[in-house]
Amino acid sequence: MDIDIKGKDYVKIDYTGSLADGSVFDSSEGREPLAFILDVGMLIPGLEADVKEAKTGDKRKVIIAPENAYGEIKQEAVQDVPKTQFPEDLKLEVGMALQAQTDQGPIPANVKEIKEESVIVDFNHPLAGQQLTFDYEVLEKRPATDDDLKAIMGN
């Protein structure tokens, strides 16, 4: 993957992401902090915009509308897929998380309904349509180096 990082910032944060009802959907607690480079598409737009304004040591909270996170729910992303498209030995269940292979790589999907000949599958991101809240602390923010990019991308 070719990413130009000249003039971009390398950032590390500890964070907790929660939904409007307060339930936590992701957190760095008990894991390594999240490391990323700004302005190269590694974060959802709403979080990236807020982090750009932050400095090392800042503790912040940002509420992000769906259009600045994983988007609104798109009805066209809910599709009727023939059962023949699934492996024969796969025991399909409503609510089951799947990964669909596309030309752009794997995407998450969710089984909504099982019919006699087909399966209703939702290809929307699981967090589409959700307002997200991130509580985070900026542990490090500085100009990015090629080594930072290699460490993040696993090269």
Image (cartoon, helix red, strand yellow):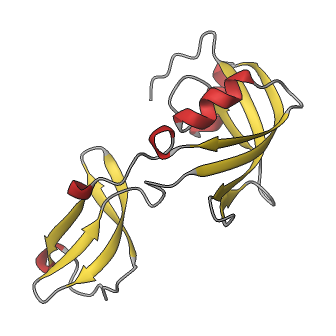
Q: Name the residue rendered at 31%, 60% in the picture.
A: 123
Residue 133 place in picture, x, y as percent: 66, 49
Q: Would residue 150 be found to the left or right of residue 61 on screen? A: left
Q: Please tell me which residue lies in front, 12 or 20.
A: 20
Residue 68: tell me if it is visible.
Answer: yes
- Is residue 150 something that shows in the picture? no
The answer to which of 153 and 62 lies nearer the viewer is 62
Residue 126 at x, y percent in the picture: 45, 61
Task: Tell me the residue at 51%/43% (across/down).
Answer: 69
- For image coordinates 12% across by 89% down, the residue present is 116
Quadrant of the image occupied by residue 88: bottom left
Q: Is residue 92 above or below residue 107?
A: below
Report whether 65 appears left or right of 118: right
Q: Residue furthest right?
A: 57
Figure disc tally: 0
Name the residue nearer the viewer: 93 or 20: 20
Q: Is residue 8 above or below residue 99?
A: above
In this view, 53 is above or below 97 = above
Q: Is residue 64 left or right of residue 78?
A: right
**Quadrant of the image for the N terminus?**
top left
Q: Picture coordinates of residue 35 (x, y %)?
A: 70, 38
Left or right of residue 31, residue 50 in this image: left
Find the residue positioned furthest to the top.
7
Task: Please state, as top left, top right, bottom left or bottom right, where the C terminus lies in the image.
Answer: top right
Relative image position of residue 30 (x, y in whole percent)? 81, 60
